[in-house]
Image (cartoon, rainbow, N blue to C red):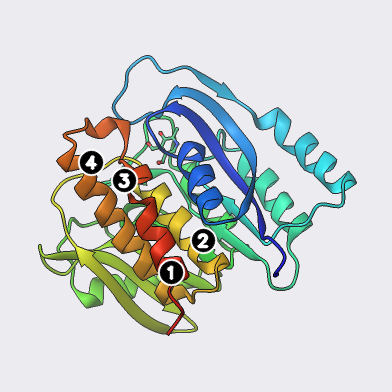
Amino acid sequence: MEKQKRIAAIHDISCVGRCSLTVVLPILSAAGVDCGIMPTAVLSTHTGGFEGFTYRDLTEDLKPISAHWRSLNLSFDALYSGFLGSFEQIDIVGEIFDTYKKDGNIILVDPVMADEGKLYSIYSQEMAQGMAKLCSKADIIIPNITEACFMTGHDYKHGPYDKDYIEQLLEKLATLGPKQIVLTGVHFDDEQIGAAIWSEGAVDYVFAPRIEGHFHGTGDVFGSILLASLLNGKNLKEAAQIACGFVNKSIQITINLKQERRYGVAFEMALPYLIAELTKSSL
Ligand code: PXL
């Protein structure tokens, strides 16, 4: 039997609202991956749609956690960073990547900081420059279009997009230095939405049916499914296709259940779809 994969997920804990570690951990576990966590902050809820949330910044804890892991000789098949608790954490996470990078493992960076044309309320513009720097250390980055625009200075537009707009954005992202890019939220019409994939200068697309509206936490669901699929032997395009399909299914279930959107999507109910996709043999 092949050795079990292990990752370190560097995200916040939003206690309620289904994003960041409350999404990453169950999805990677369901996919058979040993999911270690490095929490960047603890919030009572996420910041999108709730008032009065608590916020405990864990910047002080990151280096000691990493040093202890090092003393245990731990190694990881992937490091996956998302929402960071402070600007200072960008350099610390960069150092953690340097510590644990090895041949064949995956540094996956989701430069979580913005959506729908706006930075999240707790961040300022300097976060965009910092995240751009962190992306230079990544094997794969998975920004949404807003984050991609903040990091590159590309003009932000609402969709539908055209191929020129998306492919110019990908070229600018490529200059940040990641090996591969999966740009999310790409749609050329109202029927389908998905991701643009950039790898060694070649561009490809994957789509699923588009459901109108904003659904909280879907970026973290997408990233987690992408990584889970890669660690189960899928290639980047297959993994992005599974992630698009999974996000679509989760949204559809959330709508059918008439759940409030700020509580995230009912990804738990879509996990059988993930398992079915992962057990199909690759093309
Ligand atoms: O899903 C991204 C995310 C993660 N963590 C926190 C957030 C958000 C998006 O709003 O607020 C705390």
In front: label 2 or label 3: 2
Amino acid at dot 3: Asp
Q: Is mark 3 within 8 Å of ligand 1?
A: yes
Amino acid at dot 4: Thr
SS state under label 1: helix
Amino acid at dot 2: Leu
Tag 2 and tag 4, C-beta contact below 8 Å? no
- As displayed, is residue 260 above or below residue 140? above
Q: Earlier in the sequence, mark 4 or mark 3?
A: 3
* Farthest residue, direction front: 1
Cα separation between marks 2 and 1: 7 Å
Image coordinates for residue 2, horizontal then vertical, percent: 70, 70
Tag 2 and tag 1, C-beta contact below 8 Å? yes
Q: Earlier in the sequence, mark 2 or mark 3?
A: 3
Q: Earlier in the sequence, mark 2 or mark 4?
A: 2
Tell me how many marks there are.
Answer: 4
Image coordinates for residue 227, horizontal then vertical, percent: 51, 61
Residue with the mark numbered 3 = 115
